[in-house]
Structure formats: C-alpha cells, structure tokens
Amino acid sequence: MSGVFPDETVALVESHLREVQDFPAPGVLFRDITPLIADPEGFAALIDILAKHYKGKVDAVAGLESRGFILAAPLALALGVGMVTVRKAGRLPGPVVGVDYDLEYGSARMELQPFTVEDGQRVLVIDDVLATGGTANAAFDLIERAGGRPTGLCVLIELEALGGRAKLAGREVDAVLTY
C-alpha cells in the first residue's frame, strides 16, 4: 500500500476483488475489479474517496484503455473536470499523437487526441493496475506532447514484482493495494 489512502479504502477494494488463475495466460493471477464496479454502493464510495483526495489538484483525468475509462469518467464528473481518453492505436479519429512502448508480454501503441489536453493542464492518469509501467509511461509522454502536465498515476492495484514504479521514477504513484 502507498499509505496515501485510508485503511477503509484498502479494505473496500480488497473485499471486492476476484482472483482468476491462469488469465490471460497460464501462470498469471488476474485480479478482477468487476465485483467492485458491479456494487453501486462500493463503487460510489471508491469514487467519493478518490475525488476527496484529488480535489483541487487536477484539471483533467486521463483514463487508460479500457478499465481506466471505468474509473476516470465518474472521477472526472465528481471533480468537475474533463476526461481525456488514452487509447490503443487506431481507435481515435485524428489528429492524434502516439507512442510505442513495451508490455510485460509484447509491445503496443497508445494514442491521444492532443486537442483534449489544454496547455499546462494538470492531468491525473488513472488505471486499474500498474504492472511494468509501460502504459502509464506512454500516457505521461502523450500528455506532455499535447502540452499538459501529468500530476501522477492513481491505480487500484500495483504489482510490485513487475517493477512499474521504478520505470516511473520521479512520478507520483498512488496505489490502493500493492501485491
């Protein structure tokens, strides 16, 4: 745990996780947040906690495709700010800026529409999991290329053994749970 969020937040998220063995590949333990987002009271409580934590600190929330969108949209609404979508290649109509990066199991490209980020805008990046840090690092790069200032990353789960935090050295990372 990062120590940023109260123990109740940790308990809320942890109590709503479902562990799935051998997904998406043999040997992988997938921590599924679906039970959390399916619980209207639990999900609302999480968004309220995150909104209180980030209130006044950000001007936009960037959701990473795809589960990051689920967290970013209600958080942006609760904060009264806009949402920026960071998507996989070819899913946004142009103009876009893009960056290629490595994943724990291959490579990918993320893209952003630069007109959705205002110059100097403070942008919080949010996703469900921090693994190797490639996707988050790509998002930071895209936000900067568009003229924004990434303020940090918020994730529900950090997989510490995969070293993502180290790849994001110098960036603020807030994780509710760390495994």
Image (cartoon, helix red, strand yellow):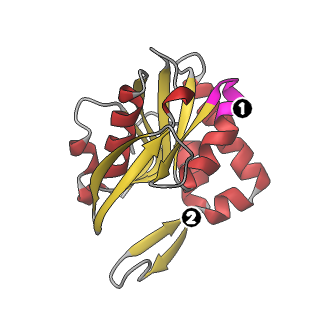
Q: Which residue is drawn at the image coordinates 42% and 25% (left, top)? A: 151
Q: Amino acid at mark 1?
A: Leu
Say whether residue 133 is visible: no
Q: Which residue is drawn at the image coordinates 54% and 49% (left, top)? A: 68
Query: Does the magenta-highlighted stretch encompass residue 77?
Result: yes
Say whether residue 39 is visible: yes
> Dot 2 lies on which element?
loop
Are circles 1 and 2 on residues that touch, CB within 8 Å? no
Query: As rendered, which of 92 and 76 lies closer to the eye?
Result: 92
Query: Does the magenta-highlighted stretch encompass residue 174?
Result: no
Using the image, determine if residue 138 lies above or below residue 22.
above
Give the residue pinned by disc 1.
Answer: 77
Res. 17 mark: 2
Q: Which residue is drawn at the image coordinates 22% and 44% (left, top)? A: 167
Residue 156 image point, x, y percent: 49, 49
The magenta segment is 76-82
Would you identify the image quadrant in which residue 137 lies?
top left
Quadrant in which the C terminus appears: bottom left
Q: Amino acid at mark 2?
A: Leu
Residue 46 image point, x, y percent: 65, 43
Quadrant in which the N terminus appears: top left
* First in sequence: mark 1 vs mark 2: 2
Using the image, determine if residue 13 lies above or below residue 114.
below
